[in-house]
Image (cartoon, grey):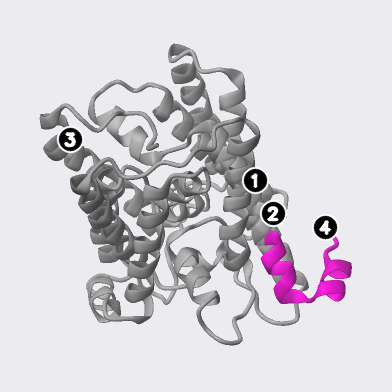
Amino acid sequence: MDIVPLMESIGESPTAALFGLATGIVFGIAAQKSRFCLRAATVEFARRTMSSSVAIWLLTFSTALVWVQGAAMLGLLRTEDARMMAVTGSWSGAIIGGLMFGVGMVLARGCSGRLLVLASTGNLRSVMSGMVMAVAAQMSLHGLLADARNWLASLWMTTGGTNVNLLTLIGLPEWFGFAMGLAIAVLALILARRSNLGYKRLIFGSGVGFAVALGWVLTFQLSQAAFDPVSVTSATFTGPSANTLMFFLIPDPVLEFDIGLIPGVVIGAFAASYFSGEFKFQGYEGEAVMRRSMTGAVLMGFGGMLAGGCAIGAGVTGGSIFVATAWLALLCMWIGAIITDYLVDQPKGGGVTQPAE
């Protein structure tokens, strides 16, 4: 992949932003058309229905594993160079932040990525929740909540100045990740058949996982060709949402992958909904729903920054390169969401298992 002519034409930072834009557009289209939603998957699991949302989530996760691990085997990506792997990880952050994020996404009726997609289709509730989440994330990164986040993250850290590769920790060969992805894909297709999912939704569900792989490969290739250091990263939404918000608020902002990612998702999801006739404005159903959504958004903003990523960032992007703390955060997100659904929504007979709308 020769990206040097593009870099020489528009510069390294604009190239990174362009790669983020491309990744975001693919993600936005695929997530909207597939109705990808971790919150809906966890609710189905909690209620032991195991239907379409679980199938789509498993297909997305498996596709990301296959594409990312396959790219690594072909030399298109070095997972040890990824930003998530190259920095010290936090076990305590993954546990506490993951639980908080899981609680938050059930209360807000969608994870950070799903809220961004819904906001792009005219859902004003998701617009407001997404803004609150971005502000909470920024406060957790550099504001009033930063000290609390740092303290919680420092309770239990990985050693050696880097994160932990789960495959290496367990002693499994490199090809195991690719094989695991294929096995999960088979399980996803079995569930999809039971749920009578159409092939189009399955294709778009796998497209979400492909977008994660696309981001990894593009940023790695850029890091190899660029003169200045470039973070090897991919789709995640808690931190980038905060960074994108600040991009429009501070003087002399810097273009990077994250800054292109968020607008890309908006463009992709909007186009997918508009041209299919699904775009429509929606608001809050009442004051209680608004309070619940705001609370969930704050929990996701802080929890996502503490956990090192959101349901996509840690759950799929970090999971696809086997970052150990990302897998732990993903597990805790499931646990937090399942407990919250059991305690809050199931007694009321509410909280539909379909993706948030």
Q: CA distance from mark 4 to mark 1?
A: 19 Å
Q: CA distance from mark 3 to mark 2?
A: 37 Å
Q: Are marks 4 and 2 in contact (CB under 8 Å)?
A: no
Residue type at the position of mark 1: Val
75 vs 317, nearest the viewer = 317
Q: Are marks 3 and 4 in contact (CB under 8 Å)?
A: no
Residue 274: give x, y in percent of width and height: 61, 38
Q: Is residue 265 left or right of residue 284?
A: right
Dot label at residue 1: 4
Residue lying at 21% horizontally and 50% vertically, measured from the top left: 292
Residue at the spot of label 1: 26
In the structure shown, which secondary structural element does the residue marked by tag 2 occupy?
helix
Q: Is residue 15 left or right of residue 142?
A: right
Residue 86: give x, y in percent of width and height: 51, 70
Dot label at residue 345: 3
In the structure shown, which secondary structural element does the residue marked by tag 3 occupy?
helix
Asked which quadrant contains residue 63, the reply is top right
Q: Quadrant of the C terminus?
A: top left
Per the rendered image, the range of residues in magenta is 2-19
Dot label at residue 126: none
Residue at the spot of label 2: 22
Q: Is residue 178 left or right of residue 75?
A: left
Kindly report the secondary structure that dominates the magenta region of the rendered protein.
Answer: helix
In the structure shown, which secondary structural element does the residue marked by tag 4 occupy?
loop
Look at discs 3 and 4 and give the one toward the viewer: 3
Residue type at the position of mark 4: Met
The answer to which of marks 3 and 1 sits earlier in the sequence is 1
Q: Residue 5 in magenta?
A: yes
Q: Residues within 10 Å of mark 4 (few under 14, many from 20)?
A: few
Q: Are marks 2 and 1 in contact (CB under 8 Å)?
A: yes
Residue 114: give x, y in percent of width and height: 44, 45
The answer to which of marks 3 and 4 sits earlier in the sequence is 4
